[in-house]
């Protein structure tokens, strides 16, 4: 299986794996794909540690890093990150009503409130990374490692970032949800476009993979396009390539692997979930993101509540809260289990067993081959 | 290109075309696919006329009929259709508030009100067909013709219908939007499942084609599955077959063909539309249906309005109104053009030129072959 991206990146298969877990990244890379480490809430020191570990475990095989770069930064967050007030200014920007709603939700589900100040700060720390300066710091750390790719989601990467990557000779991938966005990313210097359909986990648009991929392929040709959104199996990989993509970018399917650090309570929910059990909700980050539907999303999306804030303020509320919910869910607290969730795409319905990440790769490649053989039989001249 | 459905139905290509226009149905069938006439608002007499015309124009080649059968019939509509009150009872079931909202909308957009009583009756007539008795009458007409297939959308066909089709030796196809629904349809006697992703035009669910097709294929095997939703090109047809489908079912792509009776104003909107210009709205039929976003959908979906009624009552409001809007739009009334819309999928963004329906078939088949060749090159051993 060789496409132009295999040639360019030195992989055996055109299979890119997005994961926050270094073990998954290394496992996929070692199995012949290209693992991409998601660095959103990492501090620069933590990212350095993770990338050093990956370097030690992939024997020179290619891997990448993904940094979340929002196009529209909350102005108070920007100001806060620049000023000495920092975290406190951001915290003050969260309305009392929303803190109270959160406390009421915890109370209703019997989840002990965490040390809210510490949790707020932990949430706020993640929030400050979602500023331009925070993202730039992470880019600089990443570029000191032999990464094969740097990716950015949510908006056109600032020119400074694209320039740094290009100066280092590292290709830039951009995730897009519309063909208009794809054109802007190419104009901004992207080398590789990931066309992500609305069925994907995390921050997505509304155009489906089946429709988005061909129109992006046509719009950015001859730049290579990876298809993302709903892809967890070899048949879907074959479908993506049939649409004109040069490879696939998968996120959800790794969440139920052995190596994934997904909390056991959430992993169990995912294994049990059907493709109907996800929602596009603003309740975790302030921007629409597909995730498991849960009591958390139901509460924040209810028309009679205060509703989620924007990014990164909603992230400040959610990150600390989710850390507590996840922890408490592990000890068997039923209310916490009802609240617990994580980002995942509609393909969660196809994710029904726990496998090592390398097995996911091998299964996809084998099923891909079967799908192509079936197409050949269909088109064989009578 | 031969799959099991080609064998079964006697077509050259596994390409099923859903259209309300007999010319499209005949053209696709004559080009080697299988045209399916959508019979929702037809009276039994009109359907008889249409099918006789198709019989005269396809030289024995296979075609089918699709009847809309809702699972949950509005009780007052059922009672109304059974009783002498009929239309008047249904009309009385539409709240005054909704008639007034409609009148206000027409006024705001400078569209002359039609003869509302005649329009209400025209809308109500369509509404009565959406009762069990109405659908049964259409089935009986269809079964007197040499149809190759009968299809039902929106809910499990009542046993009486499946029995009639089976007694006539006509396979029954069922459109589904979830794997659970697919299993129910098979249990109810469906012979062929059309797995329709949320990106499709008309009444759809929320699971994308890329995710839905493989899970339905697995769930109903060895029954054949047609993929629907977003498919307008040969690459997408190849993708659908890669997912395990035995063929494709296309609706949207015929709306901008030469033969299509789509109103010119709406056809022009579709040609200009991008994949972002559709919404899933209840404003035309009472059930969520994907259609071009327009001033009509915006008004009915606005949170501060009365909101759409259920089916078939919203259909009573919308059908007469849309008939007037469409007519007036053709004379250049700008407000009417803003309101005008029709059902279409996200692939409307890929529909940019007017072609004869047979050319659409040939273009899809040619592009399908190219896509498979590309996959073969990708998998050729190095």
Image (cartoon, coloured by chain):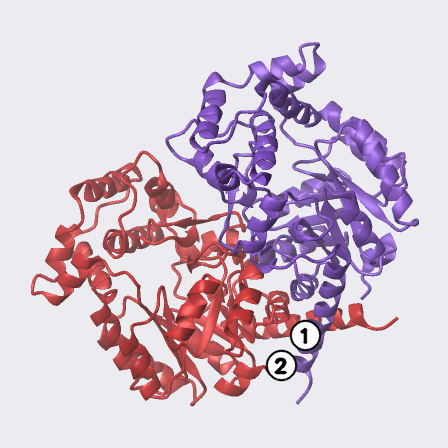
Chain colours: A red, B purple
Where residue A334 sits: x, y (%)? 37, 43
State whether residue B371 is above or below residue B275: below
Which quadrant does the C terminus of chain B fall into?
A: bottom right
Q: Earlier in the sequence, mark 1 or mark 2?
A: 2
Labelled disc at residue A1: 2
The residue to which callout 1 is attached is A369
Q: Please indicate whether residue A162 sits to the left or right of residue B321 in the image.
A: left
**Camera sees residue A132:** yes
Q: Position of residue B144 (x, y in %)?
A: 90, 34
Residues at circles 1 and 2 in contact by the CB criterion of under 8 Å? yes
Q: CA distance from mark 1 to mark 2?
A: 9 Å
**Mark 2 crowd level (few <14, some 14–19, many ≥20, 10 Å Cα):** some
Residue A60 coordinates in the image, percent (x, y): 42, 90
Say if A222 sits above or below B104 in the image. below
Front-lying residue, A121 or B64: B64
Q: Is residue B11 left or right of residue B82?
A: right
Q: Tell me: B129 left or right of B96.
A: right
Residue for point 15% across, 51% down: A93
């Amino acid at each position: 299986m060789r496409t132009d991206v295999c040639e360019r990146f030195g992989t055996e298969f055109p299979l890119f794996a997005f994961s926050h877990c270094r073990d998954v990244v290394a496992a996929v890379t070692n199995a012949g794909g290209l693992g991409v480490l998601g660095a959103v809430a990492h501090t620069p020191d933590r990212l350095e540690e993770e990338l050093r570990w990956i370097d030690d475990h992939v024997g020179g095989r290619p891997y990448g890093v993904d940094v979340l770069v929002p196009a529209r930064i909350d102005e108070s967050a920007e100001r806060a990150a620049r000023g000495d007030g920092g975290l406190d200014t951001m915290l003050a920007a969260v309305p009392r009503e929303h803190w109270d709603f959160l406390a009421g939700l915890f109370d209703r589900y019997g989840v002990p409130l965490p040390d809210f100040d510490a949790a707020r700060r932990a949430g706020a720390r993640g929030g400050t990374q979602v500023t331009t300066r925070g993202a730039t710091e992470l880019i600089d750390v990443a570029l000191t490692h032999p990464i094969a790719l740097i990716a950015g989601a949510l908006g056109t990467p600032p020119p400074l970032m694209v320039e740094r990557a290009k100066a280092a000779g590292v290709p830039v991938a951009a995730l897009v949800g519309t063909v208009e966005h794809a054109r802007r990313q190419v104009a901004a210097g992207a080398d590789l476009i990931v066309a992500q359909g609305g069925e994907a986990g995390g921050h997505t648009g509304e155009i489906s993979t089946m429709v988005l991929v061909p129109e992006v392929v046509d719009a950015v040709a001859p730049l290579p396009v990876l298809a993302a959104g709903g892809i967890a199996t070899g048949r879907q990989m074959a479908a993506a390539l049939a649409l004109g993509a040069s490879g696939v970018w998968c996120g959800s399917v790794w969440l139920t692997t052995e190596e994934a650090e997904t909390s056991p309570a959430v992993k169990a929910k995912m294994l049990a979930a059907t493709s109907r059990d996800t929602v596009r909700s603003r309740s975790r980050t302030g921007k629409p993101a597909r995730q498991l539907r849960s009591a958390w999303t139901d509460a924040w999306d209810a028309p009679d509540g205060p509703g989620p804030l924007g990014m990164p303020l909603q992230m400040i509320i959610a990150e600390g809260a989710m850390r507590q919910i996840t922890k408490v869910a592990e000890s068997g607290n039923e209310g916490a289990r009802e609240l617990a969730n994580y980002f995942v795409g509609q393909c969660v319905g196809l994710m029904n067993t726990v496998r090592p990440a390398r097995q996911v790769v091998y299964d996809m490649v084998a099923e891909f081959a079967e799908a192509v053989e079936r197409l050949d039989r269909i088109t064989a001249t009578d």
